[in-house]
Image (tube, rainbow, N blue to C red):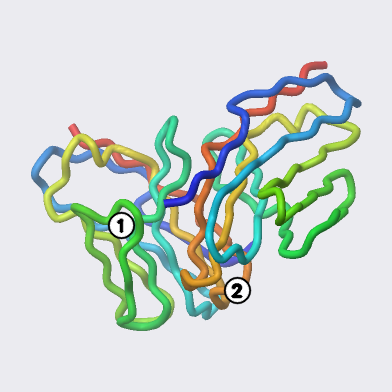
Amino acid sequence: DAGITQSPRHKVTETGTPVTLRCHQTENHRYMYWYRQDPGHGLRLIHYSYGVKDTDKGEVSDGYSVSRSKTEDFLLTLESATSSQTSVYFCAISESGEETQYFGPGTRLLVL
Amino acid sequence: GQNIDQPTEMTATEGAIVQINCTYQTSGFNGLFWYQQHAGEAPTFLSYNVLDGLEEKGRFSSFLSRSKGYSYLLLKELQMKDSASYLCAVREGSTLGRLYFGRGTQLTVWP
């Protein structure tokens, strides 16, 4: 299994508070991705990174920001959490854009 | 966005064969992936097709027809542990590795 960890694994927060989720990899892969998974929608891309400090938006990026200051870490921030951001968040990594993506264990976020 | 369609649910019995279909519409097709996801867990990679034809890997096989925008995942000798959601994902050539996922097919295997 690819060395990917996510923290926290579970979080409950209140509407309007900022939240940061962390994805950490030990594979030295260039590409990292943040997805959310909701019933009836499948996996949807939020943001992705193709190198340190290189990021781009996915399909559902509104309300989210990301940062990647070093290869191994990719942070997802909800600036002001809303109930619609209650979801399971998965991080994925890929050695290059042409390779298979491998997923982290996920973070369950509940926004009350 | 992309249009990726797969059945919502399927059921089968232990020892049987099941075929999960996936159709897609996309520009600049650059590969199709199948992932397996057990309840409460992360998706795990099963197979990858970029050229037409059948890729076999043990009990699992995946087929692709690019001209028809069609793929299927074939699971043989079903076991109870194969009960899971199966996700079809398409990669476009122009999108730096971005994958577009279908909504998944929930497979239940009965004894």
Q: Earlier in the sequence, mark 2 or mark 1?
A: 1
Which disc is residue B98 wearing? Answer: none
At a point 14% along the width and 52% down the height, the residue shown is A18
At label 1, the amino acid type is Leu
Separation of marks 2 and 1 at Cα, in angstroms: 26 Å
Q: Give the farthest residue toward the left.
A: A16
Q: Give coordinates of residue B71: x percent, y percent.
A: 72, 46
Relative side of B52 to A108, left or right: right
Q: Give coordinates of residue A27: x percent, y percent.
A: 56, 76
Which disc is residue A21 wearing? Answer: 1
Relative side of A18 to A61, left or right: left
Q: Is residue A12 above or below residue A53?
A: above
Q: Nearer the viewer, residue A32 or B53?
A: B53
Q: Residues within 10 Å of mark 1 (few under 14, many from 20)?
A: many
Q: Give the farthest residue toward the front.
A: B67
Chain letter of mark 2 equals A
Task: Judge depth for marks 2 and 1 and give the one in front.
Answer: 2
Which disc is residue A98 wearing? Answer: 2
Q: Residues within 10 Å of mark 2 (few under 14, many from 20)?
A: some
